[in-house]
């Protein structure tokens, strides 16, 4: 199957700082990438859909100014959590589509802890 | 609005037993997915079901899809401890050119040795 690399896998930061998470499709071009957030023992919640070369589409209730998404190329999307606060602590997972049959392939996830 | 409901949400079972996880969804869809998630890990793709009557099997897991009933099942045969994990079903939701998928709440499966 296709490979999606997500980095970093784990990050701890102080409240008020910004954190950038990268999502790369390694062996295919991803026209669409998705960003999810998952709280402990809960399901994945779609935050936003990003399409290469255009603005991301955010789900209802997700602050676009807080969660900045950039999809500048067909192999890279980034999620920047700006001015992070403890309530932003969560597991963030990206996925990339556009591969064979548009099936989504998931990254390994990033665990964010905001102190 | 597409809704995906899984049941049960939690299942504790003995090794060697059989059981089924159910996934109902509310509107027509193109694809249904089953994923496995181990604690602290991301999602592992198990099955993709594309058409009515589709059945796929991998080891002790078998997934099926009934698009008329909007129901998918994940059947576990002779469970072993290694299958303990959270299992998610997800349904494709084509919107414009996007390919959003909507997840169920997950079934936490705990298999007792």
Image (cartoon, coloured by chain):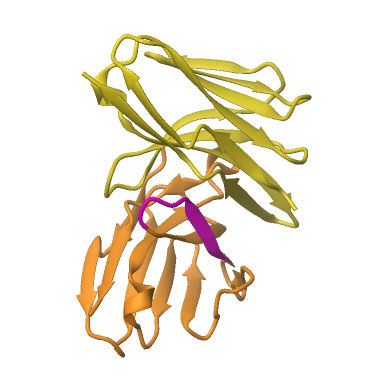
Q: What's the residue at 64%, 51% (across, down)?
A: B99
Spot occupied by residue A32 in the image (x, y as percentages of width and height): 56, 58
State whether residue B96 is above or below residue A87: above
Q: Nearer the viewer, residue B26 or B58?
A: B26
Spot occupied by residue A96 in the image (x, y as percentages of width and height): 48, 53
Q: Quadrant of residue A54?
A: bottom right
Spot occupied by residue B4 in the image (x, y as percentages of width and height): 63, 42
Looking at the image, residue A106 sits to the left or right of residue B113; the answer is right
Q: What's the residue at 48%, 79% (across, down)?
A: A68
- Whether residue A5 can be seen here: yes
Q: Main secondary structure of the magenta part?
A: strand
Chain B drawn in what color? Answer: yellow
Q: The chain coloured orange carries which letter?
A: A
Q: Is residue A43 magenta?
A: yes
Q: Quadrant of residue A23?
A: bottom left
State whether residue A2 is above or below residue B52: below
- Whether residue A101 can be seen here: no
Q: Point out the stretch of residues depicted in magenta.
A: A40-49
Looking at the image, residue A96 sits to the left or right of residue A109; the answer is right
Looking at the image, residue A71 sits to the left or right of residue B43; the answer is right
Q: Nearer the viewer, residue A22 or A108?
A: A108
Q: Quadrant of residue A40?
A: bottom left
């Amino acid at each position: 199957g296709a490979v999606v690399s997500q980095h970093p896998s784990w990050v701890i930061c102080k409240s008020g700082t910004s954190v950038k998470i990268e999502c790369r499709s390694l062996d295919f071009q991803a026209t669409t990438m998705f960003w999810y957030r998952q709280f402990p023992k809960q399901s994945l919640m779609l935050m936003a859909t990003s399409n290469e070369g255009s603005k991301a589409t955010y789900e209802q209730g997700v602050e676009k100014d807080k969660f900045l998404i950039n999809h500048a190329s067909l192999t890279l999307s980034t999620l920047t959590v700006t001015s992070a606060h403890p309530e932003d602590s969560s597991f963030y997972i990206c996925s990339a589509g556009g591969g064979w049959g548009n099936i989504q392939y998931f990254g390994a996830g990033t665990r964010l802890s905001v102190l | 609005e597409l809704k995906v409901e899984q049941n049960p949400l939690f299942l504790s079972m003995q090794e060697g037993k059989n059981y089924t996880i159910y996934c109902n969804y509310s509107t027509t869809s193109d694809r249904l997915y089953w994923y496995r998630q181990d604690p602290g890990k991301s999602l592992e793709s198990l099955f993709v079901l594309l058409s009515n009557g589709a059945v796929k099997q991998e080891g002790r897991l078998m997934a099926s899809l009934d698009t008329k009933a909007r129901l998918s099942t994940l059947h576990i045969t002779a469970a072993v401890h290694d299958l303990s994990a959270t299992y998610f079903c997800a349904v494709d939701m084509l919107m414009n050119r996007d390919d959003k998928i909507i997840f169920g709440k997950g079934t936490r499966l705990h298999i007792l040795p």
